[in-house]
Every structure is written in C-alpha cells, then in structure tokens.
Amino acid sequence: MSGIAGHGAAVHIENCGKTFPDGTQALAPASLDIVSGETLVLLGPSGCGKTTMLRIIAGLEKPDAGGRVLFDKTDMTAVPIEQRHVGMVFQSYALFPNMTVAENIGYGLKIRGVDKAARAARVAEMVALTNIGGLENRRIDQLSGGQRQRVALARAVAVRPRVLLLDEPLTALDASLRDRLRSELNSLLRSLGITAIYVTHDQAEAMELGDRIVVMRKGAIAQIGTPREIYFAPQNRFVAEFVGAANIVEGPVSDGRLTLPGGWLALDDAVDNAAAVAMIRPETIGVVAEADAFLRGTVESVAFIGDRERLVVTGAANKPLTVDAPNTINVRAGERVGLSVTPQAVRVLPKED
Amino acid sequence: MRDRLIFAGQLGFTLLVAAFLVVPVVLSISAGVTVNYFRGIQSGVTLQWVVQVWNLYAGEIGLSFLIAFATLAVTLVVGVPAAYGLHVKGGRLSRVIEEIITLPLAIPGLAIALALLLTYGGFGGFRQSWLFILTGHVVFTMPFMVRSVMAVFASVDIKTLDEGAASLGASPWTRFCNVIVPNAMPGILAGSLMVVTLSLGEFNLTWMLHTPLTKTLPVGLADSYASMRLEVASAYTLIFFIMIVPLLVAMQMFAEKGEKK
Ligand SMILES: Nc1ncnc2c1ncn2[C@@H]1O[C@H](COP(=O)(O)OP(=O)(O)OP(=O)(O)O)[C@@H](O)[C@H]1O
Ligand SMILES: [Mg+2]
C-alpha cells in the first residue's frame, strides 16, 4: 500500500427515507450520488435529518423499505456496518477509554488481522499525519478536546476506509480551535483523496470543506450544489437565508425590472410579470451617490466590523436592506444613498406558500 | 481549641457506634473459643468447638461457596449480556423486562421459594440437588448484577462506543469482549461483590429450598443454634467470618483496582 493516499468508493443512495418506530419521519425518501474522492457536506439546522442520513450510509440505521445504499455499484443495504469498511468520526468521538491512543488508532487494523509490525507502522503514520506525536501512550481521559478529535480522525482513517463519515466532528470544540482544525481537516481530506461525507450545521464549515453541499430542511433535500452555487444561486428562500446573510426583496416585475419602494432593480433572470421574490447578498450591493442609482434609501445605521462596514438601509425595499460596504466608505446614519446592484447579483426565487 | 473539641466529640461518637456494632461480633466469636460460655472466658480457651463444627459442617461450607460462585458465574454469563441488550435496545419492552428482573428485590425470599417449590417441587432430581438452591439464588441476585452493570452503561455512553467499534469492523462478539466488558468492569466487579456476598449470607429463601443434604452455611448455622450448645453456634460464626472476610477484602481490593485503572 502506498503512502497515505487512499481511494474512495462512489456512493449511491436511492430513495432512502427513514421513519422511526415512534412514527417520526426523520427523512423523506431521498436520492443522492457521491462521486469517488469527493467531500460531500450535509448541511442543515438541528433536527433536519443529517445524522440519520449519515447513519443510513454507515449502516447504523436501516432505510425504510425501498431505500438502497450502493458503494461502487454494490448493494450494501443489507450489509452491517462492520462489513461496510467505512471510517466514522462521531460527534462525541467514541474513543475507547480502556485503550491508549495508539491502541485506539490501531484497533481497526487489529480487527482486520494486520500484524503487529505493520500495525505499529500505520499507527505511527497516522500519528504524524494528525500531529499527535508524543501522545501515543496516553489514556483517552488524559487528552484535550482537540487531541481527542485528532485521535478519532486518525482511528477512522487508519483502516483506509472506502468512505469516511464525519458527524459534526468539530462542534464540541471552542471557536478558535475549530477554525484551526477545520483548515487542517480540509487539507487532510484533499491529500487523502478519500470519499468523505461530512455533517455540519455550520455554513462556514460547509463552504470550506465541501466539494458539494447538500442543504437539508425538515428531512428533505433543499438543494444540492457546489458552495458557489449554493451561495450565489440558492434555489429557494430557505437555502438563501440559511447559507450566509441574504436580503429578501419582493415586488411586482415588468419589463425585466423589479419595482421596489425606493426604485427598481434590473433582473437577469427571465420572470413573468407577477410579483417576484428575489435575494441579494449584502456584499454585492454597492453604495453610490444618490443621483447615480435607480434604487435609493436612507442609511439607518453604520457598524464597523473590521474587514467591512455593515450598513442598514431603509426605504429602498419593503424591509431594511443589509449592505456590506468596504471599510473605507464614508457615510453616516441618516444620509441618503444610492444602491447599485448588478442584474447578476439579484437572484429570483420561486414563490413559496 | 473548639475544633479539637468537636473532633474529639465526633471521634467519640464514631467509636461508640462502632463498638455497639462490633462488641456483639467479638462476644459471639469469643464464645466460640470458650470452654464453657456460662462460666465465661475463665473456663478456658479451646478450639474443640471449631473442630467439631468443621467436622460436622464442612460439607455445608463447601456447598455454600460452590453455590455462591456458581451463582456468580450464572449472573455474569446471563446478566452482563442481558444488561447490554437492554441498554442498547432501549424502548418500552426493555424497561418492562428490566422491571421484571428487578421484581425479586421487592418480593420476600419466602414467596420466591414458595413459587419455586410449587413450580419445580415435583421434579424430584432437580428438587433434591443443589441446583435448586442455585436457581433461587440466581433469581434473587440477578437484579443486583443487571442494575449495577446498567448503571455503568448509562454513564459511559456504551452505545456510541459499540457503534465506534462496529465502524472499525468488529463483529458483535468481538466488540462485546473488547469494548463493552472492559468499560463495564467497575459495574461488573461491584455487581459480583454483591452477588457473592448475598448468596453466601442468604437465609430465607435457602431455608425453604434446602433438603437435609443441601444445606448452606447460614442454614447450618440456624440448625446448630437450634439444636446444639451455644458455643458450637458461635464457633460456626467464627468459621463463617474467617472464610468470608478475606474473600470480601480481596474482592473489594480487586474492584478498587479496576476502578482506578
Ligand atoms: N432513534 C430515534 N427515534 C425517534 N426519532 C428520532 C431518532 N433519532 C432521531 N430522531 C428524530 O429524527 C429527526 C432527525 O434527527 P437527526 O439526528 O438526523 O437530526 P440532525 O440533523 O442530525 O440534527 P442535529 O444537528 O441536532 O444533530 C429529529 O426530529 C429527531 O428527533
Ligand atoms: Mg446530528
């Protein structure tokens, strides 16, 4: 076996739904394809079924009748988790308190009958990879949260799994450690080239780690796409508002113009003349002189947040608009401003309810 | 000064309570090595009663330990996997089963014995063998094993550990041995300690179930107390102590070591 690089299976999920015995439908039947070597992020608010989906892929939960899980075109639906050859990182890490760090990392190899020398070599490799040198003989209760997280990852990766499954692996850590581990994890997943499915409710984590993101809502898939697609072209209001900050504006449309209380916006998307709902990201709105714009409003507040200036502008749309301007801007609350928005930045959303 | 007074008071009270409990034991034991209890220790010190008890009741003593360790074996083999199953399965059915297992705690030993007699009294071979008493002891001690193991399971999130081991390729039996049992060890040891102690000292149920040929230590003790000199019964107590105290101390030390690890 060569180095740390592994391969991943392509995962195909077909009509997998989950209704628990108590009648809770945690997941509506959903289908999903995960390309070999890809990192797919399941993103959504608490209780939307992310863990359930992950556990179905892992084999810890059986999908409802009709659902199938395939690894590289082989049907795994009836195969128990211990034979699926997955690696799993749990939110609580699930490290074995009765074993040392090295024994934890080597456990999967021991189960597979890898001999002692080869096991030690692989453990050393994992220890180096996850930066936990010197901790090999510690017991689990002698580790910090960040160290546990690394051990859990090392243990899951050591067996060269076909699919690596991670359930909110960073949630239990404090913010600065989370940021650091997130980028470490990112380069690790890239260098391993492994198929990974990563569950999180943190959109920044999803953006950084995901090749593609599956946004979930109430047990259903709301949108699947690359981070850019999800961010710039959300297909519905839920995705627009859940991922990043979004201004939602509503108004009648005629001749490619969306009319708002403070003027109008040019639209790129072809829409009928009925009333439309559109999304604009705060950083895509430019602040210009009132006379140079087709949309105008009054600055209600200005907040300096370091890398930019966050304005709230009233009177332009039905609701106050949030605008992220460069931190060099010079405006004051109460000033009248013009807002310039390119047609590409206005994303028309389908009407709901 | 005031602190020292309080301390002295507390110490005095503790010693008093201890004496209240210990003195009868010492008296009873000393009676076992006295030539004539009614004339007091001046009558002389002897081991004749101890020897007599040993000659008369060696069988009972052996049987007691046999039953205690057989009970331990059964509660371990059945109780630990049962606790695991109940914990992992969860749900209402598991809770009902747990309650049923716990029920013998609330039922008087006599009632359990009666039920066993009514049900199995007709099976002569079984009724007359020590296995009959073993059955009673298992019913009576099982809740202690299951409960103390389940208490540990609840505190170490055994379900996730189990899933972790499964994700690494371990079969159910392998992970039971590698992960479940080692992590449940404090509960298993505490449960074992209780099971052995309870079985060795159990009287109510055993007295109902015993036959002249299947008597345990406590039943023998009652027997000798009822039919022989007080010195003999006391010598019996002495032997009971000599046998059980080192055993309990050893198990306690074992349990503590397991916890520290
Ligand atoms: N064993 C179970 N029995 C009944 N309902 C369950 C069970 N497990 C999960 N659920 C329910 O299914 C829904 C989805 O749960 P799931 O754990 O998949 O959510 P999640 O997206 O992972 O949430 P979180 O971010 O909080 O972890 C929830 O409403 C949850 O209460
Ligand atoms: Mg979850």
Image (tube, coloured by chain):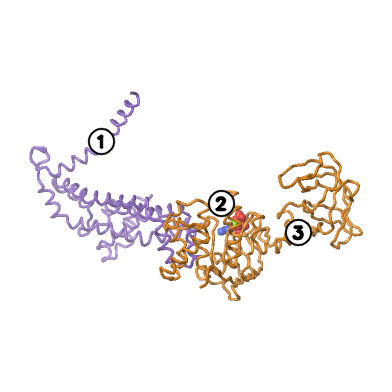
Chain colours: A orange, B purple
Task: Tell me if residue A36 comes above or below residue A343 in the rendering.
Answer: below
**Mark linked to residue A172:** 2
The amino acid type of the residue labelled 2 equals Ala
Mark 2, other Cα within 10 Å: few <14 / some 14–19 / many ≥20: some
Which residue is the site of mark 1?
A: B20
The furthest residue to the left: B43
Q: Position of residue A89 (x, y in %)?
A: 54, 60
Q: Residue at x 65, y 62 (%)?
A: A210
Q: Earlier in the sequence, mark 2 or mark 3?
A: 2
Q: Position of residue A87 (x, y in %)?
A: 53, 65
Residue B110: tell me if it is visible: no
Which residue is the site of mark 3?
A: A232
Depth order, front residue of B211/B241: B241
Mark 3, other Cα within 10 Å: few <14 / some 14–19 / many ≥20: some
Tag 2 near tag 3, CB within 8 Å? no
Q: Chain of mark 3?
A: A
Q: Quadrant of residue A107?
A: bottom left
Q: Secondary structure at mark 1?
A: helix
Q: Residue at x 66, y 57 (%)?
A: A44
Q: Quadrant of ligand 2?
A: bottom right
The amino acid type of the residue labelled 3 equals Phe
Residue B88: tell me if it is visible: yes
**Mark linked to residue A28:** none
Marks counted in the figure total 3
Observer-side mark, 1 or 2, equals 2
* Marks 1/3: CA–CA distance: 82 Å
Depth order, front residue of A89/B233: A89
* Marks 1/2: CA–CA distance: 53 Å
The C terminus of chain A - image quarter: bottom right
Q: Quadrant of residue B11?
A: top left
Left or right position of B249 against A147 = left
